[in-house]
Amino acid sequence: MRLRHWIPVLSILLLPTVTGCGSLGSSSNSDANSDNSVNVPAQQWIMSNPSQKSGIIDLEANYNDNDGGMNFDGYSNGAMTVTVPKGWTVQVKFSNDSSMTVHSVMVVPFSDRTNSSFTPTDVAFKGAATPNAESGTLNGQTQTFIFTATKPGKYAIVCGIPGHAALGMWDTLVVSDTSTSISVSTK
């Protein structure tokens, strides 16, 4: 079993802002891993704590070989949608499973999802990117960032490494006025 599957459990133990009566979100697809090594329900990549209006999203770059490894948790080209209630504080825990390529993660306006390059000022919300998103995170490293989803709308979760988002390494983030917990759906 990969260590990443334990991250939400460890986060509850180590992060006081999400302790308490957290609940898992929902998913329409329970198998993002086409290499058949482990079938992990997508809802295990998120933790939601409605009482504290906060949650955790666990993203792993190059989770499997889908789209040549240019994916988050096995999804790319908008096949995964994470929905977050407006006003919630979100902690993103990002890890890179690629042994050959650096990756990063940023939340940007949806219209920018396939840009060939990004800068730190391109983020949709203050703090919504891994440190040094344009230079990336090495294999086996984990980086964390926290942002508040202040504006409802449709955004993109992208890799900030030049060219990666243009190759399809992006998924969707929706900030919703009506949601009461963080959820994930997949195509």
Image (cartoon, rainbow, N blue to C red):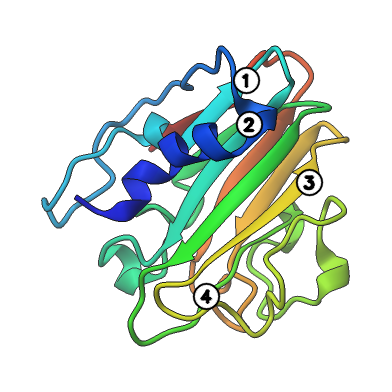
Q: Earlier in the sequence, mark 4 or mark 1?
A: 1
Q: Is residue 168 above or below residue 110?
A: below
**Amino acid tagged 3:** Phe
Q: CA distance from mark 2 to mark 4?
A: 23 Å
Residue at position x 31%, y 53% in the image:
3
Residue type indicated by callout 1: Asn
Residue at the spot of label 4: 103
* Mark 4 residue crowding within 10 angstroms, few (<14) / some (14–19) / many (20+): many
Residue 157 rendering spot, x and y as whole percentages = 62, 54
Asked if labels 3 and 4 touch by Cβ distance under 8 angstroms, the answer is no
Residue drawn at x 56%, y 36% as measured from the top left: 82
The Cα atoms of the two marked residues, 3 and 2, are separated by 11 Å
Q: 22 and 36: which one is in front?
A: 22
Determine the CA span between mark 4 and mark 3.
Answer: 19 Å
Where, by quadrant of the figure, is residue 100 drawn? bottom left
Q: Which residue is mark 2?
A: 55
Q: Residue type at mark 2? A: Gly
Cα–Cα gap, marks 4 and 1: 28 Å
Label 1: few (<14), some (14–19) or many (≥20) C-alpha neighbours in 10 Å: many
Q: What residue is disc 3 on?
A: 147
Answer yes or no: do the residues labelled 4 and 1 have beta carbons within 8 Å?
no
Up the image or down, 116 lies above or below 142; here it is below
* Residue 19 quadrant: top right
Q: Which residue is mark 1?
A: 49
Image coords of residue 105 (percent x, y): 61, 63
Circles 2 and 1: CB distance less than 8 Å?
Answer: yes
